[in-house]
Image (spheres, rainbow, N blue to C red):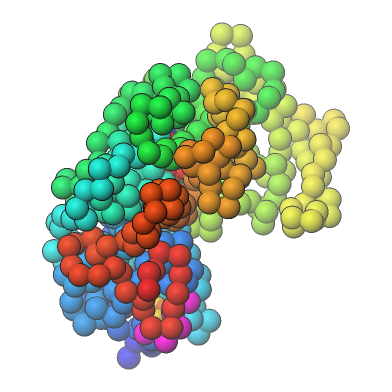
Amino acid sequence: MVSRYVRVPIAELPKEDRTKGFRLIEHPYTRGEAVIEGQRCLQCEMPFCVQACPITQDCRGYAGLVGEGKFTEAAKLILSDNPFATVLCKTCYHYCEEDCVMGSRGSPIAIRHLKRAALDYGASALTYVSLPPKHERIAIVGAGPAGLMAAWELALRGYSVTVYEREQFPGGQIQTIPRYHLEEPDLSTDLARFKNLDVHFVYGKQAGVDFTPEGLLKEGFDAVYLAVGANSPRLLAVPGEHLPGVFYALHFLLDMNTGTSPTGLFGRTNRRIVVVGGGDVAMDAARTSRRIAKDGQVQVIYRRSREEMPASREEAEGSEIEGIHFLFNKVPVRVLGTDHVEGLVVQDTALGAPDASGKRAFQIVPGTEQTLECDTLIVAAGEVADTKNFAKEYNFSTKKGWPEGPAPSGMTGIEGVFASGGKSVVFAMGAGSKAAEEIDAYLAHKKGRPPTLRPDPFGGQGSRKLPAGYGGPSWHL
Ligand SMILES: Cc1cc2nc3c(=O)[nH]c(=O)nc-3n(C[C@H](O)[C@H](O)[C@H](O)COP(=O)(O)OP(=O)(O)OC[C@H]3O[C@@H](n4cnc5c(N)ncnc54)[C@H](O)[C@@H]3O)c2cc1C
Ligand code: SF4
Ligand code: SF4
């Protein structure tokens, strides 16, 4: 008999098939497997899983419903809290599972994978319904998960929402997630449920260049939410970085998914690609490179040791399985080449004691220069906010990477303009949800009415109800 403490295994694409293309690595549960996994959930009175989720998704509730084979009810419950569940059921970093009590006894409930089963097997082609129109207009700048979540929250409450986006498509950094993790139609599947909401998209318009947020207020918008993310790659700042053949992971991955490939890397064999960085974005760049470099070689260099590498265990192991070579304790010093990249000079690092943040400082070891021959260099050294086109009166804080308003509400130095973002899809959604609540509270106060609670998004009576023993930011009494 199978132990209740052991997770129903999630089948995966055979290792030898993974680098042949971009097929999803994780296979879905069958209905029967999902029911057995759902039945493992203890239905805890105090659900730590729900508390750990940045959008307080009622995962206890849907795990129980899946355990009873009620996939349609589970799908509706999921979509009541989470308008981007089709995206998250494959990409979320499942913070809920870290805190699931079953983890201390065996393996946590496969909460994210049960979400996928509910949406696959339940009737999930639902349509959101809003409250009657308030005749107030909100502008959102940035169609990433923070902006889209705010659009959902505000439109449900009866606001008219216009989303301005500099690209020609929605999704923000969701569009950089490789197709072996997220399939192309998934975001559109989620957005199709918005069809009856008063949300309009204006593409190809960049704030700070084509318009300004304060200008939108003057035009008659009642509030503006800036959700522009951390969208500029951090540079290596070494000689030769300007050479053709040097790419930034953010651009490279976006180009791979949106069909334009200025890298010219598709279908070329015998490539020698070096990726600089040790986070999940570096792993995405390396694993994507592995799939397009055919018989070539992909190496990752990281400045600290394997133990300190920030990439998740799944991503690091997945990269190793796919034949990516790692070189640890190395930093780039200069890029070689005349009219194209020909190599990267690196030097060894020596690690010291951990600092206050727990990270070990490193020093470059003199006399350890080594040249890695390569024809392509992909830089994945992090992403930073780009606020150069915005007036200083916004008084943004950018220490988390994206621009945020300095007030606890997220309001910037310009009244009526709010700004925030998040370190992952679901954290950005949590930020967008909070921004929408703050904007609603700000306008309610200004116009002398009570704030509007998030209504039942499928047109039922009342607002979302609190699960027993739990209170959190997006649950309303
Ligand atoms: C390669 C990669 C893989 C990732 N994989 C995952 C994953 O598997 N799971 C996960 O949870 N998270 C993942 N993340 C992180 C996640 O995608 C981000 O944390 C999240 O998208 C941030 O959301 P956001 O809305 O704050 O910003 P963004 O997603 O960056 O969206 C900001 C939007 O604003 C637009 N914009 C910027 N400036 C302007 C302007 N001036 N005017 C108009 N529009 C503007 C941008 O074009 C963009 O569409 C990944 C990130 C990257 C880069
Ligand atoms: S959205 Fe993410 S953190 Fe929240 S319940 Fe789903 S998998 Fe867990
Ligand atoms: S913590 Fe784990 S066992 Fe408890 S309700 Fe959440 S998913 Fe179920």
The stretch in magenta equals: 43-48
Q: Residue furthest front?
A: 448
Q: Is residue 233 above or below residue 419?
A: above
Indicate the quadrant where residue 370 lies: top right
Q: Residue at x 85, y 30 (%)?
A: 367
For this view, does 459 lie left or right of residue 378?
left
Residue 47 counted in the magenta span: yes
Q: Residue at x 77, y 29 (%)?
A: 369
Q: Quadrant of the C terminus?
A: bottom left
Does residue 402 appear anywhere in the picture?
Answer: no
Q: Is residue 42 above or below residue 153?
A: below
Q: Residue at x 53, y 44 (%)?
A: 411
- Can you give x and y, in whole percent of width and height, for residue 304 in the image? 71, 47
- The chief SS type of the magenta part is loop
Does residue 231 appear anywhere in the picture?
Answer: yes
- Can you give x and y, in whole percent of width and height, for residue 41 in the image? 36, 82
Q: Residue at x 53, y 47 (%)?
A: 410
- Can you give x and y, in whole percent of width and height, for residue 269 in the image? 40, 27
Q: Is residue 192 above or below residue 3?
A: above
- Can you give x and y, in whole percent of width and height, for residue 36 in the image? 27, 81
Q: Quadrant of the N terminus?
A: bottom left
Foreground: 72 or 277? 72
Indicate the quadrant where residue 414 lies: top right
Ligand 3 position by quadrant: bottom left
Residue 106 counted in the magenta span: no
Indicate the quadrant where residue 398 lies: top right
